[in-house]
Amino acid sequence: MTVALDPTPLDLKDQSYAVVRGLFDAADIQRLNEICERVLAQWRQAPRSDNPPVGPQANYMRHLNDPGYHVGYPQDLSFLLNAIGSPQVLESVSAALGEEFLLALISLYFNPTGESQDGFWHKDKIGDEAGVAKIQETGAGLQMQIALVPTDDLQLVPGSHLRDYTEEEHAICVADDGIHNRSNDMPGAVRLALEPGDAVLFTQVCIHRGRYHRDTPRRTLMLSVKKRAAAEFTLRQRGLDQYSDQPWFLLPTYLDGVTPEARAFFEEFANFYGARWKARLAEVMKYSSLLDNLTKSGANPFGA
Ligand SMILES: O=C(O)CCC(=O)C(=O)O
């Protein structure tokens, strides 16, 4: 009998994905799940960014590590950061990429409260960033999804990151303005079944999609990382974007309670983007003090 084995992090370069079983134990997953549930409830009431919009069709939220979601719960924030920066997470990512990498962002995927939908097949649009890595086969970065409840909502086509779309894939993903891109007939697709504490890593440029069924509970924490070469390229070309704009890392107490190993990972991110966040802060200060002075002087800021 042949027993199918999960691809390991070293296999990501050929397979587009890897599975790590039991990355976190049950107690850690329960705690992470409670934290994510609380943050999700707050996000639904008072989102701290408008992308994606809150609503019945929402199925993910960004930046769980925004401290605005943890006011009064500082230990939740440090627990989350310690999990994301834990040795087992960073070692798995490092083995998969084989290259220096930085934090990109932390997200949560969840089942919608509105209509059920099968997601659309796609390769993430990362543009020229895809071409700057030293090891092309492991891509520009990756996504690591950590199951907080049992899930088989992620599907992907192994090996599809190494090539363009086949004719059949093109017909599903791209042709006719994408009207077939939720097809359930993608050739060669695999569905990833994860138990709580298991993780899947996958490269953004493989063909993949999620499933968003109202009655299928989903709580999946996602760490996105970028290779340093890709982060340098994108920062040079486009400056900060909605993902890298995480100025809360400048707060002196932000990493309180974070272990030295995890701290090193996050400090690298903060050192990389810090000057850009500070430059933005200086602009805001310049304009807010101007506005203050205009208001005090009774002037109409929009007058001639
Ligand atoms: O897991 C999902 O629902 C989809 C994830 C996805 O499309 C992505 O990370 O680009």
Image: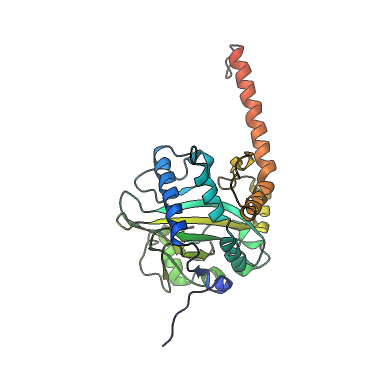
Q: Position of residue 91 (x, y in %)?
A: 60, 64
Q: Position of residue 295 (x, y in %)?
A: 58, 15
Position of residue 296 in the picture relative to residue 49 (left or right): right
The residue at 52%/45% (across/down) is: 75
Of residues 147 and 211, the one drawn nearer to the viewer in this rendering: 147
Q: Position of residue 201 (x, y in %)?
A: 52, 64
Of residues 22 and 241, the one drawn nearer to the viewer in this rendering: 22
Quick one: quadrant of the N terminus? Answer: bottom left
Colouring method of the image? rainbow
Q: Can residue 260 be seen here?
A: yes
Position of residue 48 in the picture relative to residue 230 (left or right): left
Instruction: Look at the picture and state if 259 lies above or below 10.
Output: above
Q: Residue furthest top?
A: 298
Q: Can residue 126 be seen here?
A: no
Of residues 75 and 54, the one drawn nearer to the viewer in this rendering: 75
Tally of numbered discs: 0
Quick one: quadrant of the C terminus? Answer: top right
Q: Position of residue 68 (x, y in %)?
A: 51, 38
